[in-house]
Amino acid sequence: MHLFSLLLFLSLGALVKFVSAADSDWCYTGCEHTPSHWANIPGVSCGEKRQSPIDIVTSNVQIDPHLLNFTFVNFSSKHAIKSINNTGHTVKCTLEDHQVEVSGGGLDGTYSTLQFHFHWGKTEHHPGAEHTIDGHRYPMEMHIVSLKKGFSIQSALQESEGLAVLGFFINATDDGDMSGPWAQLTSNLTNLTEVDVKKNISINDLIGNVDLTKFFRYMGSLTTPNCSEAVVWTVFQQPININKKLVQRFLTDTGLMNVYRPTQPLNGRDVFASPATSLPPSHSWCYEDEACDYKPSHWHILPHSYCDGKRQSPINIDTGNTVTDKHLGAFIFTKFDDKHAIKYITNTGHSVKCVLHEDMVEVSGGGLGYVYSALQFHFHWGSNKSDGSEHNVDSKRYPMEMHIVSKRKDLTLEKAIETPNGLAVLGFLIEAKNADSHSSEQETHSTSDMEAWKKMTSYLSAIHKINSKVNVTEEISIDDLLGDVNRAEYYRYNGSLTTPSCNEAVVWTVFKEPVKVDQDLINMFPTHAGYHNVYRPTQPLNNRKIYTTSASSAPVPIILLLLLACLCSFSHVYQEEDD
Ligand SMILES: *[C@@H]1O[C@H](CO)[C@@H](O)[C@H](O)[C@H]1NC(C)=O
Ligand SMILES: *[C@@H]1O[C@H](CO)[C@@H](O)[C@H](O)[C@H]1NC(C)=O
Ligand SMILES: *[C@@H]1O[C@H](CO)[C@@H](O)[C@H](O)[C@H]1NC(C)=O
Ligand SMILES: *[C@@H]1O[C@H](CO)[C@@H](O)[C@H](O)[C@H]1NC(C)=O
Ligand SMILES: *[C@@H]1O[C@H](CO)[C@@H](O)[C@H](O)[C@H]1NC(C)=O
Ligand SMILES: *[C@@H]1O[C@H](CO)[C@@H](O)[C@H](O)[C@H]1NC(C)=O
Ligand SMILES: [Zn+2]
Ligand SMILES: [Zn+2]
């Protein structure tokens, strides 16, 4: 990234003041401010927390289904390169203004491509790409730099994603084309100043047959001072293979060597990969409708998987085949009424999850035998056209299902997932509110019921991106979301987590009465998350018993609830009973 020369090129005198690091203020070797001292240059961001380049650890990257195909405009134009010059830090090819563009690929908007340049090392044995993959450094790296449309460079530098850089690794091969586009490009690197190029080369000629659907994505910075943290990075997985004699020309013909910045700490940042990227298997599970190597029928071959065990979840609950258990009494819900229990809401790429404050919300009773502390709740859904609960009741699937996941209070999480009753999950089926019953009075009633769901779903648009999260500041309690659903009637069985590694550590509770939610709020889940049908198919029962609360026993807590509700509005309750 060669910002200063970029600015000079644009001759925007006013911007020079803004950029405090002049080209001569820094270097890779042989001056005061080498990379480890860039942070000391006044006014730069080089010492901050989202710096580039990074080492991409493929076992830690997450697939992001939004990282679909790029759209490249004029990448195949043979007239787009305006000039090529040696900046003293790199070789840079400047493009004609406003001709080359890139969008798609999960980028937010269209970016206008300004220039591309290179980073390299010293010898064959001292490679000089900036990014590394699992510690491997390629000989060279090419950066194609684009500016978000509608932004000046100055304003883009203030934006988290003001610049988009496409990084291509360059691999040196023993035998490679010595007369093609790379040979042309490197044919006159000697005495390069600001030579006009009429070389008849397009960007696509240089990229060659790299698979552009396979790439990594993360938020980072310019890799030269000022190191502005304004770059959405794309690093393609496959390298461009060129003859090693051409790689050598960058060193010998420019007099520059080791022009790359060392990798920087990740500081908790997430690195994503496009769905087409080939990754270690443990990171590529998905549901039936999505593209990946490990769909539900293959989850069992993932490393450390229990997914082909004998007590898997979800199941179909055959109500004619359940056993009444009088020990299945009332639950004790602690802090379910706390309107500040939800810490944040996040999009995991497989679900929307509300993470609770630690050691706050608890559940006990209900035949569980232990106190469990609630960690999070999340949702499973279908599409706008199909249902997506995980559990079925008499082979009926419901539109959605909510899972409140709790861990035995006396165990650590690591221990709990290895213990047959280490986790307790409360499953609430979710049904669409009957759209037909719209008396005006009911309208008012259902609005107040839906208030909590509206508040919660209002966050969905803010967590559009995989792994994004926002703190929940609205007052929403779990009781608000569950409403007056009957919590005394439920099914109980021994099962598993319903996502890999499918640990058989879950005591399941599936409540009989579904929670009713407005259809348009249900639809917001697939619409905003961008993925749908996120449920595991039902699993064989394998002789397990499904227990049930006895239907006849008077559900005391519900009567209390109704009494309370009556105090607020008698007609309200009456109406509900009518449904
Ligand atoms: C993405 O690009 C690949 C290869 O260029 C192509 O096979 C695939 O159909 C494209 N996908 C979409 C959704 O356009
Ligand atoms: C692509 O390049 C041509 C000139 O080669 C130019 O006329 C056209 O406007 C460019 N397209 C875009 C979308 O900028
Ligand atoms: C890089 O080039 C070497 C030959 O120098 C080759 O063996 C290797 O497969 C190439 N790597 C990739 C990923 O193409
Ligand atoms: C490069 O420049 C030097 C001095 O400016 C000159 O002596 C040399 O011949 C030039 N080389 C080429 C290939 O033009
Ligand atoms: C540009 O290169 C293409 C092949 O890459 C060739 O067909 C064409 O004649 C060249 N045009 C010029 C003006 O050199
Ligand atoms: C779950 O498994 C435990 C131990 O195997 C057993 O004691 C308990 O009765 C089972 N509960 C259900 C609901 O099947
Ligand atoms: Zn660069
Ligand atoms: Zn779940």
Image (cartoon, rainbow, N blue to C red):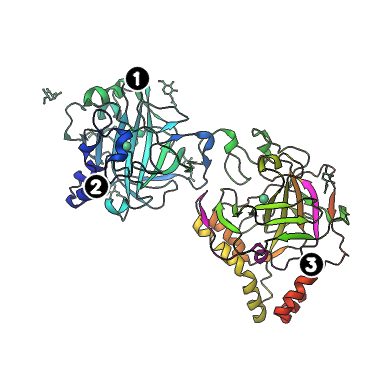
The image's mark for residue 557 is: 3
Q: The magenta stretch spans which residues? A: 465-494
The image's mark for residue 112 is: none
Residue topped by disc 2: 19
Q: Secondary structure at mark 3?
A: helix
x 72%, y 51%: residue: 372
- Looking at the image, residue 206 sits to the left or right of residue 574; the answer is left
Q: Residue 134: image x %, image y %? A: 48, 30
Q: Is residue 561 above or below residue 273?
A: below
Residue topped by disc 1: 124
For marks 3 and 1 on the same chain, the one whose residue lies earlier in the sequence: 1
x 65%, y 66%: residue: 480
Q: What is the CA distance from the residue labelled 1 to the residue labelled 2?
A: 35 Å
Q: Residue 452: image x %, image y %? A: 61, 67
Other-residue count near label 3 (Cα within 10 Å), few / some / many at <14 / 14–19 / ≥20 = some
**Which quadrant of the rendered structure holds the C terminus?**
bottom right
Give amino acid for label 1: Glu
- Foreground mark, 1 or 2, reads 2
Give amino acid for label 2: Val
For marks 1 and 2 on the same chain, the one whose residue lies earlier in the sequence: 2
Q: Is residue 75 visible?
A: no
- Foreground mark, 3 or 1, reads 3
